[in-house]
Amino acid sequence: MKRFVLDNSVVMAWYFEDEASDFTSAVLESLAESEALVPSIWPLEVANVLLVGERRGRSTEARSGRFIALLDTLPIRVDGATAQHALAGILSLAREHRLSAYDAAYLELAMREGVAMATQDQALRRAATACGVGLVGI
């Protein structure tokens, strides 16, 4: 089964229609035959974006609940070793590529697992390319 690291910028485009693209739709469809890997911070990132969307009137609690139910059906595996790499590899990558520690966690996971990454974040795409990490180009 094909595996890749899935950045939250792609996931939340599935939720907010105005952020969706052909790319994000294709990534979602690819999960029928692939497995996505995410760092352990991912559930907190998803929760925060949903909460902010509700507070800003872009969504509702009921819609967030339906989206969480959808995510639970997808082959998304949360990495359990993210914290072990936070104060060394992730911090170093964040410094070197001027990323947030959160974004660097996705990059570190892709490097550690030797897989490509699906992201819409331009700074993260540049850092991935600089580190020799492939980009999902569906």
Image: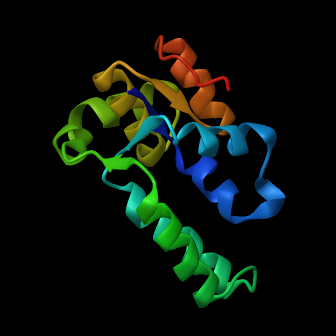
Q: Report how many numbered discs are placed on residues in the image.
A: 0
Q: Residue at x 27, y 30 (%)?
A: 89
Residues 39 and 27: in front is 27
Residue 115 higher or lower than 75, as above or below:
above
Residues 46 and 73: in front is 73
Quadrant into which the C terminus falls? top right
Q: In which quarter of the image is residue 84?
A: top left
Q: Which residue is drawn at 59% across and 25% down?
A: 136
Q: In which quarter of the image is residue 67?
A: bottom right
Q: Residue at x 48, y 72 (%)?
A: 69
Quadrant into which the N terminus falls? top left
Residue 45 visible, this orientation: no
Q: Where is residue 75 in the image (x, y as percent from the top left)?
A: 40, 48
Left or right: where does residue 128 sit relative to residue 57?
Answer: left
Q: Quadrant of residue 114?
A: top left
Left or right: where does residue 31 sit relative to residue 24?
Answer: left
Q: Where is residue 74 in the image (x, y as percent from the top left)?
A: 45, 54
Q: Residue furthest right?
A: 18
Q: Residue at x 62, y 58 (%)?
A: 12
Residues 45 and 96: in front is 45
Residue 119 higher or lower than 57, as above or below:
above
Left or right: where does residue 81 sit relative to residue 92?
Answer: left
Q: Position of residue 73 (x, y in %)?
A: 44, 61
Residue 60 visible, this orientation: yes
Residue 57 higher or lower than 69, as above or below:
below
Q: Where is residue 70 in the image (x, y as percent from the top left)?
A: 52, 66
